[in-house]
Amino acid sequence: MRTPLITGNWKMNTTISEAAALAGELRLTLEPVSDVEKVVCPPFISLAAVKAELGGSSIKVGAQNLYFEDKGAYTGEVSALMLVSLCEYVIIGHSERRQYFGEDGKMVNRKLLAAQKAGLKPILCIGEKLAENEAGRTEEVLRTQIDEAFSGVDLNLLVIAYEPVWAIGTGRAASGRGANAAIGFIRHRVAGIDSQASRVLRILYGGSVTAANAAEFLSQPEIDGALVGGASLKAGEFAAIVRQAGEARR
């Protein structure tokens, strides 16, 4: 059975001191939970402080992004080599990166390759926009995003997060059944590329996940966890989601 994974994406929130304090709260509340993998992804500036706060605990640290070159004249960017001593996971291809910063499938692929080369575990985000969903194009969009991202990537060292763009930060989550169907399609598509990897690949749901609706998603057979946004900034709510993930697999 695939171990559930709950990842908190703090986005552009928290100062260094706030991030350290939140990490400390999570350590106290989540350390007893042993049947769920737990990851928090603070802003770049707080990675070192959060890693120090969580040192020796079972909570892992991830970054929210990286650049695909190891070093060079890329002002403002952060490479995989800079991150590898600070975290274990990295989010790649989030819809906000695609929407606001023009990241396309080619760039996402280069970032995945850079992450894996450095020894980081990528969490690849894919998902359709509202108009695409309403036009019945969800599977077409997911197929394209998968095919663009996967060239040369080790699928055994990857996590995928299905995040319908229309549900991210809107309070409008997908239904459990709808998310399960989309994630089932993703797994089937991966199976066509590497059947063994499709069986171990963890696929998360993301998009307005809260403690109130998490069980609807986490109880679905194809969904292996969640990528949590705003709710991950509240220690109690994030902890409740983590506990529900463990309960769903018992």
Image (cartoon, grey):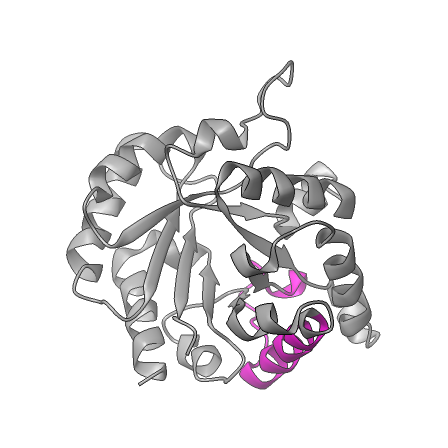
Quarter holding residue 42: top left
Seen at 54% across and 80% down, the residue is: 222
Residue at horizontal 46 percent and vertical 56 percent from the top: 229
Residue 148 appears at what percent x and percent y?
78, 53
* Quadrant (top left, top right, bottom left, bottom right) of the N terminus: bottom left
User: Bounds of the magenta span?
Assistant: 164-189
Above-or-below relation of 180 to 166 = below
Residue 102 in the image: state x and y as whole percent.
Answer: 74, 39
Q: Where 4 sits versus 90, above or below?
A: below
- The residue at 74%/66% (across/down) is 142
The image shows residue 29 at horizontal and vertical percentages of 18, 60
Residue in the picture at 53% in, 64% down: 206
Compared to residue 178, the image places residue 19 above or below, namely above
Q: Quadrant of the C terminus?
A: bottom left
Horizontally, residue 189 falls left or right of residue 226, namely right
Position in image of residue 202 (x %, y %)? 51, 67
| Of residues 66 and 238, the one drawn nearer to the viewer in this rendering | 66
Residue 15 visible in the shown view: no
* Res. 130 visible in picture: yes
Left or right of 23, for residue 62: right
Would you say the magenta stretch is mainly helix, strand or loop?
A: helix
Query: Was residue 187 drawn as part of the magenta stretch in this picture?
Result: yes
